[in-house]
């Protein structure tokens, strides 16, 4: 793209004198100490050292960032943002000794959120999800994934996916939707999980025809669905050309990661109980490991995901909030940077790549997650000198400005 006097319909803005963490190269942080980025419409036209800006550059606007830090917009690659009600009471029960599995088996847990979700109007579902989305966005998040999974009936799953789509229409935010009908067994199908999976399989084509779904997920675990049931669902997803991802090896090892990898999964998520076999399969398939420190923390898990082995195998690691009412009511992806480091022993740079470039990859979106020419112009400006500060401090939001698709958001 020429930066000289090419006539263009797109506004060109040059953001100058920033510390850039581009994550666009293998060099530490992709760091550029006195950098500049030029946006043209929704894309970066140029990224580099300020001193290297073309001398005859023509732009519509110039902004001096006075050495502030600029990173790519953050990508939250795993959320369950659309649901009714909350589970604060269940939290109290757990504090008194009940386990997450016991509550789920007694009909609470996910199924209590299903009842509250079914009872919520379309607008109420949208409004509560939008409130949560705005909190994520205030920390520089520009793309999120949103799963269904609290409707568990055709009409309610569709309503949840439609609420997620509506977020992208009404907020300056990109949303990828994932069908997670295979999240829990609804009470209408008690004792008949195979019949429920048969039903969920028939819903997918309709969700796809209505433009409601970008990917398919399942909860493969003792309190979720079996590998055989997961495989049947994934076979239909594959037939429809929809990419898959999996809640795998969260509470037990079901060899779900290897199954998902056979379907070329974009990601396997949670992974506390992941085996060496699962790691090898993910590595071969190029599947991203999405680690969720919020759920690990909130359920007080003690089995750590095999971070060193993932790292050694070269499996890309992403970090997400897993925002949901039961196991991770977290609404801060920046806090997850700290938790990924303190709980999982990621380096701050690994954690940051996990909420930018690797998170984008977990969503099958190679056009974002780095600062580079041709990428989508999604970035955050921070009151910080270096991104390691966000992994270090917690309970603090130094995000000052956010540009989404080339347009600066007004922050409230
Ligand atoms: N694993 C989780 O941690 C969430 N879903 C899943 O499959 C929990 C969802 C919930 O408890 O509402
Ligand atoms: Fe989840």
Image (cartoon, grey):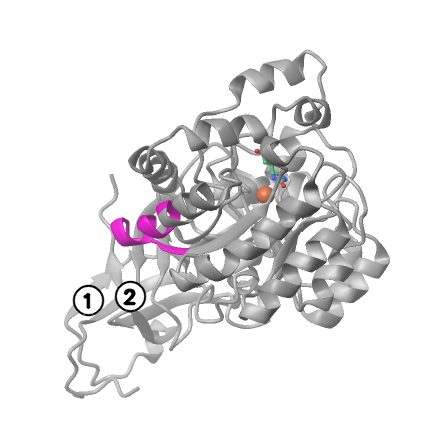
Q: Residue 171: say if magenta.
A: yes
Query: Marks 1 and 2: CB-CB under 8 Å?
Result: yes
The answer to whether any part of residue 116 appears in the image is yes
Q: Nearer the viewer, residue 90 or 241?
A: 241
Residue 62: mark in rendering: 1
150 displayed left or right of 259 = left
Return the x and y of residue 158 as percentages of the image width and height: 42, 48
402 displayed left or right of 239 = left
Above/below status of 96 relative to 368: above
The quadrant in which residue 411 appears is top left
Q: Quadrant of the C terminus?
A: top left
Return the x and y of residue 24 as percentages of the image width and height: 50, 71
Find the magenta span and give its range.
163-175
Sequence-earlier tag: 1 or 2: 2
Which SS does the magenta portion mostly show? Answer: helix
Q: Mark 1 to mark 2: distance in Å?
A: 7 Å
169 displayed left or right of 297 = left
The quadrant in which residue 207 appears is bottom left
Residue at the spot x=60%, y=61% of the render? 244
């Amino acid at each position: 793209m020429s930066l000289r006097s090419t006539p263009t319909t797109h506004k060109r803005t040059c953001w100058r004198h920033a510390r850039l963490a581009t994550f666009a190269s293998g060099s530490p942080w992709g760091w550029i100490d006195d950098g500049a980025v030029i946006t043209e419409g929704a894309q970066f036209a140029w990224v580099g050292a300020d001193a290297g800006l073309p001398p005859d550059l023509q732009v519509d606007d110039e902004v001096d960032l006075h050495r502030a830090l600029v990173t790519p917009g953050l990508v939250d690659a795993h959320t369950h943002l659309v649901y009714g009600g909350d589970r604060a009471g269940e939290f109290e029960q757990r504090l008194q000794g009940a386990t997450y599995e016991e509550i789920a088996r007694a009909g609470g847990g996910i199924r209590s959120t299903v009842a509250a979700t079914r009872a919520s109007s379309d607008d109420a579902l949208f409004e509560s999800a939008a409130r949560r989305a705005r909190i994520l966005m205030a920390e520089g998040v520009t793309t999120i994934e949103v799963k269904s999974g609290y409707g568990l009936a055709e009409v309610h799953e569709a309503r949840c996916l439609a609420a997620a789509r509506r977020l992208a229409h009404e907020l300056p935010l990109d949303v990828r939707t994932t069908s997670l009908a295979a999240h829990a067994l609804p009470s209408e199908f008690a004792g008949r999980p195979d019949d429920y999976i048969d039903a969920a399989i028939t819903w997918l084509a309709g969700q796809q025809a209505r433009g409601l779904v970008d990917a398919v997920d399942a909860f493969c675990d003792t309190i979720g669905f079996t590998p055989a049931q997961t495989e049947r669902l994934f076979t239909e997803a594959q037939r429809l050309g929809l990419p898959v991802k999996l809640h795998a090896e969260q509470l037990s090892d079901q060899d779900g990661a290897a199954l998902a990898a056979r379907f070329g999964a974009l990601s396997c998520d949670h992974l506390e109980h992941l085996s060496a076999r699962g790691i090898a399969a993910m590595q071969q398939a190029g599947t991203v490991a999405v680690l969720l420190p919020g759920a690990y923390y909130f359920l007080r898990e003690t089995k750590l995901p095999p971070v060193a082995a993932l790292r050694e195998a070269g499996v890309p690691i992403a970090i997400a909030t897993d925002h949901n009412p039961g196991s991770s009511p977290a609404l801060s992806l920046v806090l997850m940077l700290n938790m990924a480091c303190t709980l999982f022993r990621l380096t701050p740079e690994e954690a940051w790549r996990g909420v930018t470039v690797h998170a984008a990859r977990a969503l099958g979106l190679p056009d974002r997650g780095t600062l580079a020419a041709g990428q989508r112009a999604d970035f955050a400006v921070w009151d910080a000198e270096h991104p390691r500060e966000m992994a270090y401090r917690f309970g603090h939001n130094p995000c000052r400005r956010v540009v989404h698709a080339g347009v600066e958001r007004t922050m409230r």
